[in-house]
Image: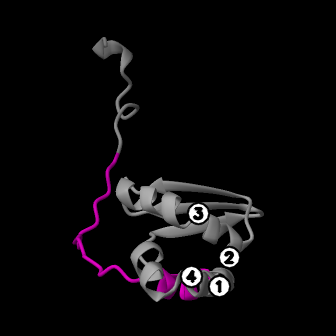
Amino acid sequence: MRKDLVVPGEGEEKFMVATNTKVVTVQFTPLESRMAKEKPELMPGLQKLHELLGEESFKKHISNIHNINMSGSNMLIVADSELHRTNLERNCIRVIMEAFNVDNIRVVTQG
């Protein structure tokens, strides 16, 4: 670009950087613990799902879900990995639909 077309300050941005930056690692907590605090409206469905699946299957498939969002009769589940997504779809979709009374579930992975 020609220098005579650039107005001083027009193409410049001021970047603000936090002075006390740090990265913190937080231990992953089970889904049911997080949902009790963040989305208590999902707890009846999670309790019913726990009853339907049993303790072992619930811990294996449901506790390590990253997030659940609902809108009407639709549900979005954020799984940990592609393998986790596949296992949820193969082993748990029908039971999740029954527990939460939803018609449509979409399972995606984080990242």
* Residue type marked 2: Ala
CA gap between label 3 and label 2 equals: 10 Å
Residue ID for mark 2: 99
Residue ID for mark 3: 93
Q: Which mark is residue 48?
A: 1
34 in relation to 64, above or below: below
Relative placement, left or right, of 22 versus 32 is left
CA gap between label 4 and label 2 equals: 19 Å
Relative placement, left or right, of 5 versus 69 is left
Mark 4 or mark 1: whose residue is earlier in sequence: 4
Mark 2 or mark 1: whose residue is earlier in sequence: 1
Select label 4 or label 1 by which is in front. Answer: 1
Residue ID for mark 4: 38
Helix, strand, or loop for circle 3?
helix
CA gap between label 1 and label 3 equals: 14 Å
Where are the magenta residues, as a range? 14-39
Residue for point 33% across, 14% down: 4
* Residue type marked 3: Ile
